[in-house]
């Protein structure tokens, strides 16, 4: 199973949806909660985005929840998670 990291904030419905999709694929992931302005700045520098969730699979940034759902609908997510 692939190395997956997901950056989230508490109460975010998109974060919850992305985590549920990963769980449905039996993917184990490391969740990093973005807590401070400094965390947000680091995440923005890392991804070029200002939203959560932000997901990395095998060290590659795949985007947010909508991006993850799109990968799944194209059948690419399962391959990436192998």
Image: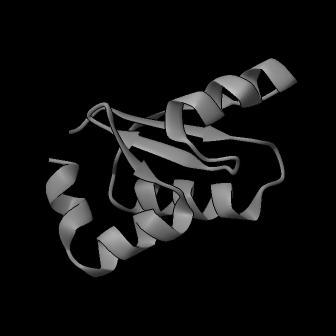
- Residue 66 in the image: state x and y as whole percent: 52, 70
Q: Is residue 55 above or below residue 78?
A: above
Q: Is residue 17 above or below residue 40?
A: below
56 lies left or right of 20: left
Residue at horizontal 64%, vertical 35%? 44
- Residue 32 in the image: state x and y as whole percent: 62, 28
Residue at horizontal 69%, vertical 51%? 51
* Colour convention: one colour
Q: Give the farthest residue toward the top.
A: 38
Residue at horizontal 31%, vertical 31%? 59
Viewport quadrant of the N terminus: top left
- Residue 3 in the image: state x and y as whole percent: 30, 32
Name the foreground residue: 50 vs 8. 50
15 lies left or right of 63: right
- Which picture quadrant has residue 14? bottom right
- Residue 13 in the image: state x and y as whole percent: 74, 64
Q: Give the farthest residue toward the bottom.
A: 73
Answer whether residue 7 is visible to the viewer in this image.
yes
Q: Is residue 60 above or below residue 49?
A: above
Q: Is residue 66 above or below residue 38?
A: below
Name the foreground residue: 4 vs 36. 36
Total marks in image: 0
Answer whether residue 36 is visible to the viewer in this image.
no
- Which picture quadrant has residue 39? top right
Residue at horizontal 14%, vertical 58%? 79
């Amino acid at each position: 199973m692939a190395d997956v990291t997901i950056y989230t904030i508490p109460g975010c419905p998109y974060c919850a949806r992305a985590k549920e999709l990963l769980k449905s694929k039996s993917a184990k992931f490391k969740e990093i909660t973005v807590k401070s302005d400094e965390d947000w700045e680091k995440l923005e520098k890392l991804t070029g985005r200002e939203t959560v969730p932000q997901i990395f699979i095998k060290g590659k940034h795949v985007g947010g929840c909508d991006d993850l759902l799109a990968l799944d609908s194209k059948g690419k997510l399962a391959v990436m998670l192998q």
